[in-house]
Each structure stands twice: as C-alpha cells, then as structure tokens.
Image (cartoon, rainbow, N blue to C red):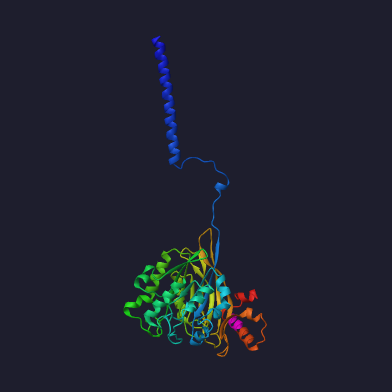
Amino acid sequence: MKRNVIAVFLMIFMAVGIAITFVIGNRDVSSLNQNNTTQEIPSSDDDNKQVVAEDITATLAVCGDIMSHMPQTNDAWSITENKYDYSTMISGAAEWVSKADYAVANLETTFAGSPDYSGYPAFNTPDELSDALKQAGFDMLLTANNHSMDRGYDGLVRTLDVLDERGIAHVGTYRTQEERDKNSGVLVADVGGISVAFLGYTYGTNGIPVADDKMFSINLFNTDYMTNTSNLNREKLLQDLNYAQSLNTDLIAVMIHWGTEYQIQQNSYQQEVAQFLFDNGADIILGGHPHVLQPMKLYIKTEQNGEQTQGFICYSLGNFISAQKDRYTDTTVVLNLELEKDGKTGKSQVKSYNYVPMLMLNRGSGADVRFELLDVYKTLSQNLDDTQLNNRLNQAITDCHNILGENEDKGKIAA
C-alpha cells in the first residue's frame, strides 16, 4: 500500500514539475519575443518594395535692385491716408513674385527712420516700402551693396530691425560680430522643400569707410573696397563657402553686388569672380549693381566624382524699381529659376529658367500715379491708345530678348 501511495505521489510531483517548467519556459520565450526584433513576421509583396522619395521641383523668383529716389518717395505719399504706400508701384510684379515658392531681391536703400528721407547719393526710405515688399511676396533681401552704409552703422542696424519686424529674411549685413559668426554669414532657406544656403556680398560702400571694429557688419568680397582696384578676398570667400558646404544643403546661392554700371555686358572681373565661386561650391550666382540687365545662362558644373549638374548665373538683374528712365535702366524682369531635387539620388540642380519682362513707367510729375512697374505683355494686351507707351513696352521686350535670350521669355509664352 505504501508503495502505491509513494508511486502516486511521485507521479503527481513529476506532473507538477513538468507543468511549472512549461509555464516558465513559455514565459521566457514570450519575454525574448517582446525584447528583440528577431521575431519572424510573415511578409507581403508590398513589404518587399523599396521606398523611393519623389522628385521635388520648386521655383525661386529673383528680382533686381530695389531703390527709392526722392521722386518715388514723394509719389508713394498718400494724402488721403496720411502715410506712404508703395504697393501700387510694385503691384505689376506681385502676381509673379507671389507665385514662387521663395522670392528674393536686392534692397539698395536703408530704413534709417523718419523724417530725414533721401534718395541718391545717400538713400533713406520710409519703412512702408518694406510693408509693400512683404505684401508682394518677397521672402529675403540682399542687404550688402554700395548703399548699405549710406546712413552709417546705425542705419544699417535699423534696416535689419525693420526687416525682422516684417518677417523678411536678409543676408550680407549684420548687427554684431556674433550674428556674423553664427553661421559664417550664411542664411539657409527652405525653397519649396529644397534647402538653399544663401550668401551675400558687395564690392564696396561708395567710399564710405567701415570702422575697424564694425568690419563684421558687411560682407565685402574685395580686400581694397575703398579703391577702384579689384583684389578678390579669396580667403574670406573660401571660408564662407566651405562653411556653406558643411551645412549639406541641396544648393548654394551667392547674391553679389558687382560689375560696371550701365553696361549690358559683364566685365572680365565678374567672370573671374564667378568662376572662383563656381569652382568652390556655388551652384547659383545672382548679380546686381549695373542698374541694367546683363546676360544669364545655365552653367554645367562637374563634381569631383565626375558627375555633372546644372548651375545658373545672372550677371545683373538691373533695377527692380527706381526713378532712372534711360534706356535699359527702366527695363527689368522677374526671373524664375526652376529647382529640381532627384528623389532617388538626392542630387539637386537648376532644371531651367525663364523670365517675365517688366517696365518701370514714369508718367511724369503731374500724374496721380507717377511710378508703376508694368507687366509688359499684360499691358500690351490691354490695347491702350498710347503709342509712346506701346513703343516703350515693345522696346523693353526687344532689349530683354537681345540681352537675355528670347526662348526663356515666359511672358511671351503666357501672352
């Protein structure tokens, strides 16, 4: 009987032990499955497909020199509203500027404050111009040019403050050494999903000396900015371009104030500087200062690995708004760069470009609205009974075609 009892007891003990082992074993396996990613999961055909990012295209709009001579400033004054209003003056271009993913131009004046407004040779413009630029769709302005120091360092600082208040980015001038050093003077912008590092420079300051302790405040690409000679500051440019490349943006764009005034062809120094910039990382070069249009073209860049991409250069976009009315100085364009990023390779380039011709109309001192930037083709389509104006509009088209090329005239295509 004892043997039977003992046998039964042993059978029960073994059964309990097996059960405990099974539970513990399952618990350990469950724990491993929760804490490791090696658990096998059935796959489907969709899971085996490689995900490839889509190509990205974006538009960068570029305009020329934004100026306000005193006749323009006076014309912007609204007696009924008791304030300055530049919106009518630039409304003709606003349609094209606002369509772009990002829009830039050269601000060739200062916002040094009222009431001492002035035009050439030392510009100081009402803050309301910045309101009109923001309303038109401008996102960023080059502030490094030969008029940056027209009202001294204090005027330069206030100009940047005004732009900041309107939410307009800027490149080329700086309030402090820390601000200049923060990104080596580089501004990174998101252009419709394509990252672009912008750099901005000027050849000089119209003979206005920059104090030794304020040299950080403006990007000068010449070592001898107080003279008429041209010695490129390669060390400074290399430092900035190297930093821009270290940011690993999709593209690098240099906005630069250079060239010979009122000449519709670039000079040899512009070509020298442009080649240096392209050779050291720039993909896009956007020039200004001559106050007239100069040629633009795509530029084939060959990388160190032998791959080729398309860059772009415009030697001068001429005036955007001004009171200058000689031939070429009143003709400008809204330039559109189509940027492209390959979703498979991640490479970016300038895919193509086009422009829309504009004419800065000066109706004379007796007109209710004296200055107005006109879309050339849109104005011609109105069939106005004004032979003189129509002739000027057609001359603007001819000049754009001769300098920039006819095939890239988007206004003609749209018309």
- Judge whether residue 401 is colored magenta: yes
Q: Residue at x 35, y 77 (%)?
A: 215
Residue furthest top in the image: 1
- Does the magenta stretch mainly form a helix, a strand or a loop? helix
Q: Quadrant of residue 338?
A: bottom right
Q: In the visual, does 410 lie left or right of 173? A: right
Q: Is residue 60 visible?
A: yes
Q: Residue at x 57, y 44 (%)?
A: 44
Q: Residue at x 57, y 77 (%)?
A: 93
Give percent across and percent down for residue 110. 43, 80
Q: In the visual, does 341 lie left or right of 158? A: right
Q: Is 239 drawn above or below residue 203 in the view shown?
A: above
Give percent across and percent down for residue 8. 42, 15
Q: Residue at x 43, y 22 (%)?
A: 15
Give percent across and percent down for residue 357. 59, 79
Tell me the quarter of the image containing the C terminus.
Answer: bottom right
The front one of 359 and 5 is 5
Residue furthest left in the image: 213
Over which residues does the magenta segment extend?
396-402
Q: Is residue 232 visible?
A: no
- Judge whether residue 215 is colored magenta: no
